[in-house]
Image (spheres, rainbow, N blue to C red):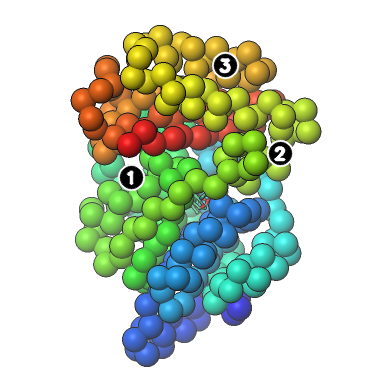
Amino acid sequence: MIIFKHAQSLAKHILTLHEKGQTIGFVPTMGALHNGHLSLINQSRTTCSSTVCSIFINPTQFNDPKDFEKYPVTIENDILLLERAGTDILFLPSVAEIYPAGLTSPIHYELGYLENILEGFYRPGHFQGVCQVVHTLLKIVVPDYIFLGQKDYQQCMVIQKLISLFSLPVILKPGDTLREADGLAMSSRNLRLSPASRQKAVAVYQALNYIKMHIKTTDIQQLKQDAIQIIEQAGFNKIDYVEICDAATLLPVEEAGNGKPLVVLAAAFLDGVRLIDNIIIA
Ligand code: PAJ
């Protein structure tokens, strides 16, 4: 695996790969890697001739400075995992490398309602920061494919919107959510949970599954209340949302059963750690 710290040298190297007719797959991450990230690396390896992973904890997407400060860093282990997974290139830039002119974005991304619902509503500015960094990374890496996890369902939709807004020549490939044995969605933030909280954390997935199991027979409002109760009873301190949405638009549905795929999403805090998850009901 070749590690690049500078955008210019990486871009030059990638140009030579493109000239050789290679296809480039890109997996952007913020590190503290787990099997969810590695599943995206694997998908890229089976689709593309070269796989580029980036590790960059992007300051502009953190609406909560404490969350940024506490974001887990496990770089040595990350490098080992990426090597073992057969990653070709790791891009490991500094903040100055990505934002030489400062953190303020010269571009406002017109994301429409996607920016104001769910994650966008509870994390103001978050998706502008995500677009700012992914747009910059895409300009450096110029991949044929970008691999993103559906664990961040709304993020996938936002990046698809970014690709359309700028007619970027890249194809987005969404990947399934990888889970721990008890069902908890793998997440870098799980590292911040105490052993006791780790036991409780699975309640979000259980609540989403409860909705999936009862969607055909129970009223939507009732389902959401029941799911909130499951999460609260497990000991979560604060719930941002539990929502049942049209999987194509992410707009909330008033009733199920018209045959359209749905996505059930939740975000909640456990001991100061914000966890998100979703499941698709096809
Ligand atoms: P990060 O949280 O590190 O996630 C990197 C990628 O891994 C994202 O596409 C995310 O959806 C995916 N991922 C996370 N948990 C997963 C799981 N359990 N199963 C499958 N895939 C999973 O998302 C970001 O970083 C950043 O916002 C980024 C896109 C890198 C921009 O800074």
The type of residue carrying mark 1 is Met
Residue for point 50% across, 46% down: 177
The image quadrant of residue 198 is top right
The reply to whether discs 2 and 1 touch (Cβ–Cβ < 8 Å) is: no
Residue 281, above or below 128: above
Dot 2 or dot 1, earlier in sequence: 1
Please give the residue where the numbered disc 2 appears in the rendered image. 192
The type of residue carrying mark 3 is Ile
| Residue 222 spot, x, y in % from top left | 40, 9
For mark 1, give the secondary structure.
helix
Give the numbered dot on residue 230: 3
| Residue 67 spot, x, y in % from top left | 62, 38
Given this view, does label 3 or label 1 mark the residue nearer the observer?
3
Q: Return the residue nearer the eye: 187 or 139.
A: 187
Residue 221, above or below 125: above
Queried on whether the Cβ of the residue with tag 1 lies below 8 angstroms from ligand 1, the answer reads: no
The type of residue carrying mark 2 is Arg
Residue 184, above or below 59: above
Q: Return the residue nearer the eye: 76 or 222.
A: 222
Query: What distance separates the C-alpha of mark 2 from that of mark 1?
Result: 27 Å
Give the numbered dot on residue 157: 1
Query: What distance separates the C-alpha of mark 2 from that of mark 3?
Result: 22 Å
Q: How many marks?
A: 3
Given this view, does label 2 or label 3 mark the residue nearer the observer?
3
